Image (cartoon, rainbow, N blue to C red):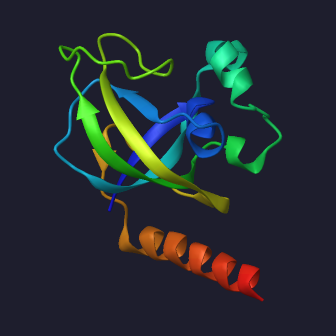
Amino acid sequence: MQAISVQQPWAFAIARGGKSVSNQGMPTAYRGPLLVHASMRVDLKACDSPLIQAAGWDPRDPLATIGAVIAVADLDHVCSPTDICDCGPWAEPGMHHWHLSEVRALPRPIVALGRPGLWEPKPSLVTAVTTMFTTAALNNAT
């Protein structure tokens, strides 16, 4: 499993609002599960974006936090800036479009340090995420 740090409110839009493309400056050959980490930086101009507003941006939502893992998604494929693609309204021209599917918001954020680019989370973080989903599933089954 890998992780990516994303500024708020974009991370929130992935976790809660249907943002299925993460715009990145670099490509990756990685495919598979990806922790979505809300970085310590906030894109204040984006908070007023019509796309962010349509995604339900609410700074009071626990997943609007910073410095924490807030979701898990599957990284399915990546479009390069030279590809002619129709990646939807979330895709920025000139960027690599990392296509995310099966986004699962965490029941609550898990505080963690992130880093730029794709990074490998500590095993204890992966275990905490897995345990949180397992516990939530068990609680919902009863």
For the view shown, which residue lies furthest in the front direction?
86
> Where does residue 41 sit, x and y in percent of width and height?
56, 30
Res. 114 visible in picture:
no
The N terminus: image quadrant:
bottom left
Count of residue discs: 0
- In which quadrant will I find the C terminus? bottom right
Q: Is residue 20 above or below residue 102?
A: above
Kindly indicate the quadrant of the structure image that contains residue 48.
top right
Above or below, 142 relative to 123: below
| Residue 80 image point, x, y percent | 21, 23
Q: Is residue 39 left or right of residue 55?
A: left
Q: In the image, residue 85 lies at what x, y percent? A: 29, 18
Residue in the foreground of this view, choosing between 92 and 68: 92
User: Farthest right residue?
Assistant: 60
Which residue lies at the image location 43% right of the left edge and 32% below the top edge? Answer: 21
Which residue shows up at 59% across the image and 21% down it?
43
* Placement of 76 over or under 48, stated as above or below: below
Residue 101 visible in the current orientation: yes
Q: Does residue 7 appear to the left or right of 60 in the view shown?
A: left
Residue 81 placement: quadrant: top left
Residue located at (63% from left, 38% from top)? 12
Q: Determine whether, in the image, residue 55 is placed left or right of residue 38.
A: right
Q: Position of residue 125 (x, y in %)?
A: 46, 68
Residue drawn where x is 64% and y is 12% of the image: 45
Q: Is residue 138 left or right of residue 142?
A: left
